[in-house]
Amino acid sequence: MKVDMRTIYRFTPFDYQGELPTGGDVYYECTCGGIVNSVSFIKASCDCGNITGGGGSSKVTDPSKVKPLRGKLR
């Protein structure tokens, strides 16, 4: 089942330095349009497979295609 995270959360991009940040309110948006939580406990991935998550973590294949976002419930 595919859920559009934008209907549940309000996302705000933010700047970072170094490695991609992680946290409960941090999400990764891929250039393909998919959004995955940085500490996803459920199995999730973006459409192109660049971001995959599950078990409390997420793996990013190509960080240059990812933008970190802060997510807050609407």
Image: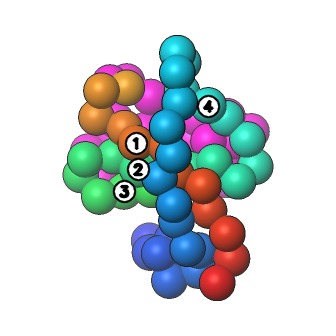
Do tag 2 and tag 3 residues touch (Cβ < 8 Å)? yes
Question: Whole-Å distance between the Cαs marked 1 and 3?
Answer: 11 Å
Look at the picture and state if 54 lies above or below 63.
Answer: below
Look at the picture and state if 4 lies above or below 55.
Answer: below
Question: Residue 50, located in which quarter of the rendered image?
Answer: top left
Q: Earlier in the sequence, mark 1 or mark 3?
A: 3
Q: Earlier in the sequence, mark 1 or mark 2?
A: 2
Q: Is residue 13 magenta?
A: no
Do tag 1 and tag 2 residues touch (Cβ < 8 Å)? yes
Q: Could you tell me which secondary element the residue under label 3 belongs to?
A: loop
**The residue stretch that appears in magenta:** 37-62
| Closer to us: 10 or 5 | 10
Q: Could you tell me which secondary element the residue under label 1 belongs to?
A: strand
Q: Which residue is mark 3?
A: 34
Name the residue at 52% across, 65% down: 11
Q: Which mark is residue 30?
A: none
Q: Which residue is mark 4?
A: 21
Question: Residue 39, located in which quarter of the rendered image?
Answer: top right
Q: Residues within 10 Å of mark 4 (few under 14, many from 20)?
A: some
Q: Which mark is residue 67?
A: 1
Name the residue at 25% across, 47% down: 31
Q: Is residue 53 magenta?
A: yes
Which dot, 2 or 3, sits closer to the camera?
2
- The amino acid type, in three-letter code, at marker 2 is Glu
